[in-house]
Image (spheres, rainbow, N blue to C red):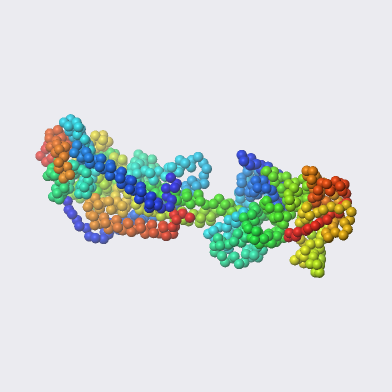
Amino acid sequence: MNRLLEAPIKIGAVKGVAAKLLALVFLLAAGQTARAEEKLTIAAAADLQFALEEIIVSFRHIDPAARIETIYGSSGKFSTQIRQGAPYDLYFSADIAYPRELESEGYAASKAQPYAVGRIVLWSQSRDARAMTLADLADPAIHKIAIANPRHAPYGKRAEEALRSAGVWEKVEPKLVYGEDIAQTAQYVQSGNAQVGILALSLARSPQLAKQGSYVLISDRLHQPLLQGYIITRRAADNPLAQAFSRFMSGKEARTIMARYGFALPGEVE
Amino acid sequence: MDFSFSAAGLSAADISAIWLTVKLATLATFILLLVGVPVAWWLARTRSRWKGPVGAVVALPIVLPPTVIGFYLLVAMGPDGPLGRITQSLGLGLLSFTFAGLVIASVFYSLPFVVQPLQNAFENVPERALETAATLRASALDRFFSVVLPLSKPGLITASVLGFAHTVGEFGVVLMIGGNIPGQTRVASVQIYDHVEAMEYVQAHWLSGAMLLFAFAVLVVLYTFNPNGKR
Amino acid sequence: MTTVHARFNLDYPNFALDVDLDLPGRGITALFGPSGSGKTTLLRCIAGLERVAGGLLRVHGEVWQDGTMFRPVHSRRLGYVFQEASLFPYLSVRRNLEYGLRRVPRAERKVQLEQVVEWLGLNKLMDRDDPSGLSGGERQRVAIGRALLTSPSLLLMDEPLSALDLASKQEIFPFLERLHDELDFPVFYVSHMLDEVTRLADHLVLLEQGRVIASGALGETLSRLDLPTARQDDAGVVIEARVAEHDETYQLSRLDFPGGSLWVGKVPRGTGALVRARVLARDVSIAIVPPQGTSISNILSARIAEIRYEGRDRASLRLAVGDRQMLMSRITRRSCDLLGLANDMQVFAQVKSVALIA
């Protein structure tokens, strides 16, 4: 360990090692792509992590052989990555604007399909959130409030809009901490580092968070509607598994699961 | 969603992020030297059986992913964690999402990059020089300042520059415990990340370019004053 | 007047030191012995650089260490000169010299910078910023000066000349001999070279395998037949004498000492000057009747104090010249027997060669 920081590494040695590493990476990548047809890679917004996993379990009852991999993260990031050729077959975004963009630019093999209207909630582990309103956030006893980064996270944008509409933005802004995506935002509040957070309804309804805290819905009149949608990417245009899963998503079983997590489409009963 | 073609150049927010980064790195480096010098000296000179374990703990941040460090710090700084409990009982609230919290995190994260060059330099101080100084009436502390430090100058420079540069580049840890608060924890690395996330690529290029120039300048300093890495 | 008392007992797997010594408080005491005999270790113990449990060290009445306390090196008023000069490479010559001086309270400074510069001929070096450009001899002189400037009550020198080439050694000797005269505190000088010892020492301590096998005045100890020094090829005595007269015609000088005189090649010193001369045992032959018609001019009347046989071919004799001066002679056993030499016999010592050493 002590010798790690000695004189700069010799260039020749680096080239040799780099060449070997590159070869290894190519081999691994080749191994992956060879089986593209029988596999599905889904990139989904962080708030879908619980609902989507249940849906996939359900899907496997019909197609036990299906190999499905899911990656959860920030919608914006996935959209950028897909443009750069990331190997995702399905893309679920917390804001349908992203998939619509990709569609208009030719990166999609399907039309952007809505799957829910996103709702935001106040969630807290240490306080009873059910009785809270946005105005309560101005209370000096609350030191830190977590929201997702409004610059690029859909839930964060809606949170900011709601706070502004409720007229508490000035008082609350100095106390805000920003999570890179809605999952990290939840983590901030779960760990107690922030006393309250504005989270996605779907996360608040998940088994983990439901056990640990309480939530209250924030009126959807306080913010722009958050229509959430997905596409099949251009890359998966000929992937039968992608088509099958897409059809399953609109089916009754999937919709029931989604509803349980608060993912309702306009017109559905919540 | 809107495509905002941001103006070229560094915005006020970017400059604030750079300034915050410089403040963080300077303060962290200063503390790192204060903490690192005694630790490195002990590691260089001790024959105790604790040398191995302590050395390994110091070196941990080299191998641990920054997100792991950040995650554990987040938990530790939280209301139920050991650090959080201490700060709360002292009436200081929580360290997460604060500049002070970042400073402490940076000290952990960059510790081996400061301790190891220092330890190397100290190990290379010839015993004879210290014995000579002792026969010339220099007490232990005196010997440290009048013999060890001058003979370790290259190591001190390397340690300071590495500690500084490493803190400037810190991202994973900041991401976990920073909370991205402008003027407090929104450092340059996070600001660049946000530009990319928000697809403000022009801004991202400008800020990244500025950081690249800065890093280059730092390395030029290091290699001009210390071409062999150690003397 | 013994003012340094040292007792050390070290037992390492590869090495042991067991000494109990009283050393004089003035003059140069040489710690002499072969490599590995413990001389450097003893010196380091006296300095406190080796920390020995239960050692005892008393200097001028002050206890520097005993079973209950240990005065750290930097608190001991001593100067130490190492084999390699160990000048601080980042300090100029002047700053090196001043290093110890600055750490001695003004009131306790008995040695001044100008004095030391003069004693050791450092004038030309004082404006050097980088000690690495100095020659070995120059570096050692600076190191000696640096040690002296701490106004020590004891100066320890650990083979200060061994790392130097012959030319540098010759260059430094005069300075060391001057120190002999100038210093009013004792010097302990470690060496394995007999020529250094004979030139400089007043008192000789012989070490062998970590033990002291002899400790006494130089002249007396060198003339002892029972010590390893007597068995060396260049065994012999040291004579302290005064220059009595010069013979310009024959370019000779006469040296007087209690017990006799010796003629040597012209000495570049004035009359009355104190010098040291060496007379080797192999250069001293014995006659039982006053020698006649011989080319050897130095003939001294002496009494046989001791005879020691070495094997069947050699005999060493210790002779007393006058009351105090001893001579050593090495002859064949055959001659010894043929002449019927015995203790207390009055004989004539023929000194074939005298070397002036200081």
Residue B122, horizontal then vertical, whole percent: 50, 51
Quarter placement of the C terminus of chain C:
bottom right
* Residue A42 image-quadrant placement: top left
Residue at the (31%, 40%) spot, across then down: A191
Residue at the (28%, 48%) spot, across then down: A177
The count of marks equals: 0
Residue at the (41%, 58%) spot, across then down: B223
Residue C219, horizontal then vertical, whole percent: 77, 53
List the single residue furthest toward the left: A267
Q: Nearer the viewer, residue B188 or B215?
A: B215
Q: Nearer the viewer, residue C123 or B91?
A: C123
Residue at the (27%, 46%) spot, across then down: A179
Left or right for B52, reference A103:
right
Left or right for C164, reference C247:
left
Residue C214, horizontal then vertical, whole percent: 74, 46
Residue C242, horizontal then vertical, whole percent: 79, 62
Left or right for A131, reference C215:
left
Left or right for B91, reference A198:
right
Q: Nearer the viewer, residue A176 or C143?
A: C143
Q: Which of C280 and B67 is in front in this view?
A: C280
The answer to whether residue B107 is seen in the rendering is no
Query: Where C266 falls versus A23 (above or below)?
Result: below
The answer to whether residue A91 is seen in the rendering is yes
List the single residue furthest toward the right: C289
